[in-house]
Structures are given as C-alpha cells and as structure tokens.
Amino acid sequence: ALFKGLLDSLNIKNDLATVSASGYLKADTVIKTDFKKLTSTGSIIVKDGSFVNSKIGIGIKDIIANLVFDNNALNIENTSATINGSKLTASGMIDNSSNADIKLDVNNLSLPALYMAFAPKELKKEFLINSALLTAHINIEGKLNSLNAKLKTTLNNLNLSDSKKTMFISNQKADIDFLANSSDIKGTVNDSGFLFKIPSMKTTASVDKVLINIDKNNVTLNPFDLVYNNFSKINIKGQIKDYLNDPNIDILLAGNLTTANIKQTLGRDIAPYFAS
C-alpha cells in the first residue's frame, strides 16, 4: 500500500491495487563485494509466497527461497516458484572469491498472459499471442566481473495474429542456444514448422526448417526453402553484416513464382495482366 501510494503521488500509472500478495519473509543479511571478493552473512528466507494479479491473469505462487549468505558466500538452495502453473527453479552459489555458478530453469511457461501483462500497450492493440510455451535453461558462471552466460531455450506451438484476425503466424518449434560474455556472443536459432497465412487473400507462406547463426558481428541465414501458396518455391540464403552498428544486408533469393500463385494473392482485378 505504501509503494502504491508513492506511485500514485508521482502520477505513475500502475495496477498495484489489483495485486494481492501473501507469504512469509525473513531477511537478515549483510553483503559487500568489490566483484573480486564477497563478504556476507545472514540469509533471506521466503515461504509460501505469492503475487497474484487477477486483472491481467498473472499468478506467481508457491514461492520458496533460501538464500544463505554465511561464510562469505551465497548458496541458493531449495528455491522455486510457479508462474501460472509452470515451475521455475533456481540453484547455485557465489563463493568468497566471487566465483559464480547459478542455474535457472523454467518448463512449459505459457506466454500469452505474460505478453498481455508486460508488452507495450500499442503492440498489444495490434497483435495477439494466442499460444506459446517456453522452456529455458540459463547458466551463469565465472567471476562476477567477467561472467559467462549460457542460454538454451525451446519455444513450442507459437500462434499469433493481428487484432483484426486477418493475418496469422504459427511456428511449431524454435530451439535457441546462446553463449555470451562481456566480449563475445554466439548462438544458433534452429526453427521448424513456420506458417504465415492471410485467408482473405488466399495466401500462405511456409518454411519447413531454417538454421540461423548469430555472432557479435553477423547474422547468417543458412539456405532454406520458402514455399509460397503451396506450389511456388524460393530458396533463400544470406547474411546481415555488422548488424549492431552499420547493418549491411545481403540476401539472395532464387526460385520460381507461378503466375497462378501470384493471381491467387493479388486477386481477380490483376489477373488480366498475367499470362495463364
């Protein structure tokens, strides 16, 4: 209530009036670090915690946290929560020499409610996420001043549309793997089962499989086939160089578009301008 009152006094829009919280919290700790050495004592304990916002359909429940800072180290033990029924777990440690090894895991997290809760308002007006399940494993390790992060994520059964239901995108599975630190990043996106549809124009575009490689400088599209309206096939490959600073796009398309497929998309009015 105090935090909500502060936000209200600053004219900051918030939905905290619709949030209910419960649980047990005990915090008695002292922490100091220069990112070379950790000095700490005490613990932070949470039992049976929950945050629920019924207005936007977000429920973080069954919160258990055991963060133990004794002996100049952090140990994360028996720490978990459920987010709209999907379990999130955390484990790991930071020793007294500031060496970290922390793991976060979430399994089959449903994304539509999270999208409605946190996406920008203008984006939500234009697009809807109807279904999507996220499974992720994050591992953070190394010295606190030079951490390495490993991300392994799978996105299943993505279905989205525009708000007027004129355009639909679905994707069966995307496997995303990344390694990153302060000086480098590299990863892959391995996607399968992509489908784009505009029913009013009788238009579809599909990609069975595509592999994308990403490093700190370039995004590389390995060769893949895009099938347009079931019969036209276009092979696509290329690269986006220096994508963070001065993007240079070099994409090569090769294949055939049938006039029947083009007529199907553009409609009867344009058909006379194309040979049969």
Image (cartoon, rainbow, N blue to C red):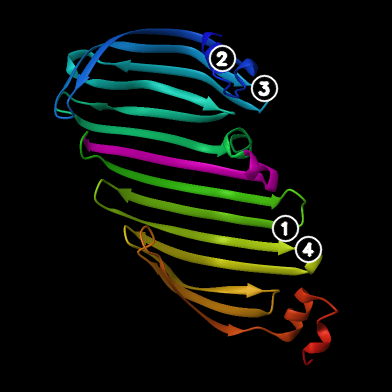
Identify the secondary structure beneath mark 3: loop
Q: Nearer the viewer, residue 25 or 135?
A: 25
**Which part of the image, by quadrant, shows the N terminus?**
top right
First reached walking from the N terminus: tag 2 or tag 1: 2
Q: Residues within 10 Å of mark 2 (few under 14, many from 20)?
A: few
Vertical comparison of 158 with 190: above or below:
above
Mark on residue 94? none
Residue at the disc numbered 3? 54
Gap in Å between the C-alphas at discs 2 and 3?
A: 24 Å
Picture quarter containing residue 246? bottom left
Residue at the disc numbered 2? 9
Gap in Å between the C-alphas at discs 2 and 4?
A: 49 Å
First reached walking from the N terminus: tag 3 or tag 1: 3
Please identify the residue farthest to the front as the structure is shown. Answer: 10
Give the residue drawn at x 31%, y 57%: 216
Q: Nearer the viewer, residue 156 or 53?
A: 53
Question: Is residue 132 on the magenta stretch?
Answer: yes
Identify the secondary structure beneath mark 1: loop
Is 77 situated left or right of 86 in this image? left
Give the residue drawn at x 47%, y 35%: 106
Gap in Å between the C-alphas at discs 3 and 4?
A: 35 Å
Residue at the disc numbered 4? 199
Is 145 situated left or right of 10 in this image? left
| Residue 220 image point, x, y percent | 40, 67
Instruction: Give the magenta range.
Output: 121-143
Q: Residues within 10 Å of mark 4 (few under 14, many from 20)?
A: few
Q: Amino acid at mark 4?
A: Pro
Vertical comparison of 45 with 145: above or below:
above
